[in-house]
């Protein structure tokens, strides 16, 4: 299997996984079929559309290649009709979401590098490709985006992007190296969920009142 074929399969697998994740969130909000498919489409392809616009690939691959939109639509529609069974697979959904995060991190970073984006920019684009769809999904379903909460999500994608850039600089950006980068993101995300790792948050102290502390 060539690297390009492997990347296409990884991309489409990530699309299917994120579409299912987005559709599941939309079903939980009791959206209709169109709403479920639309949220699934945004979750699956939002990050890739952002990536392609940034690297000046127009039209974005999500619109230029029918396989992307079709994969997202089929996955989201399947979740709409099978959501009672799907709802019982929460753990499986989290695992698949972690897999999609790893796949999109790798493909997004590599595509940025292929477009001759400098290393730092490629890292940022790779991370945003991975988390962009989830950001759109959460905004459309009126949730605080998971990437802005305490969970280790964007940080895992950032680590994977950095690894891809380093592998490319060292000449090891073949299927094996890219698979290792995707696995890094996947494992980091799952271990963070398992051990409840989180990024630090600011501690809000209540205002002090009393002598020497006038209230306002």
Image (cartoon, rainbow, N blue to C red):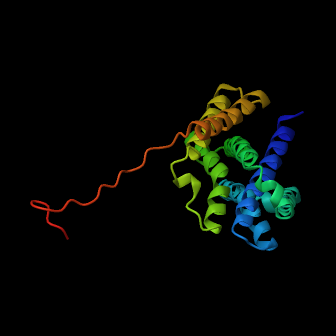
Residue 136 image point, x, y percent: 64, 62
Residue 172 image point, x, y percent: 71, 26
Viewer-side residue, 23 vs 109: 23
Viewer-side residue, 115 vs 73: 73
The answer to which image quadrant residue 26 occupies is: bottom right
Locate residue 9 relative to residue 99 in the image: left or right: right
x 77%, y 52%: residue: 88
x 73%, y 55%: residue: 21
Viewer-side residue, 35 vs 173: 35
Residue 153 image point, x, y percent: 59, 45
- Name above or below for residue 197 compared with residue 204: above
x 75%, y 65%: residue: 27
Locate residue 47 relative to residue 155 in the image: left or right: right
Q: In which quarter of the image is the C terminus?
A: bottom left
Can residue 58 be seen here? no
Residue 72 image point, x, y percent: 82, 59
- Name above or below for residue 148 compared with residue 122: below
């Amino acid at each position: 299997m060539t690297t390009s074929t492997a990347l296409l399969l990884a991309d489409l697998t990530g699309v299917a996984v994120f579409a299912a994740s987005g559709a599941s969130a939309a079903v939980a909000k009791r959206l209709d079929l169109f709403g479920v498919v639309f949220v699934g489409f945004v979750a699956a392809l939002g990050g890739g559309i952002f990536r392609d616009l940034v690297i000046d690939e127009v039209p974005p691959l999500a619109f230029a290649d029918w396989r992307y939109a079709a994969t997202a639509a089929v996955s989201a529609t399947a979740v709409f009709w099978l959501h009672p069974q799907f709802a019982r697979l929460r753990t499986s959904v989290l695992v698949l979401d972690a897999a999609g995060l790893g796949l999109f991190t790798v493909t997004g970073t590599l595509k940025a590098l292929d477009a001759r984006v400098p290393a730092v920019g490629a890292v940022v684009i790779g991370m945003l490709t991975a988390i962009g769809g989830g950001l759109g999904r959460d905004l459309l379903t009126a949730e605080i985006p998971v990437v802005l909460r305490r969970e280790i999500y964007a940080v895992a994608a950032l680590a994977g992007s950095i690894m891809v850039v380093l592998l490319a600089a060292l000449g090891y950006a073949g299927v094996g190296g890219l698979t290792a980068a995707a696995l890094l993101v996947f494992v980091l995300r799952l271990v963070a969920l398992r051990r409840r790792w989180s990024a630090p948050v600011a501690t809000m102290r209540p205002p002090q009142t009393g002598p020497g502390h006038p209230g306002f």
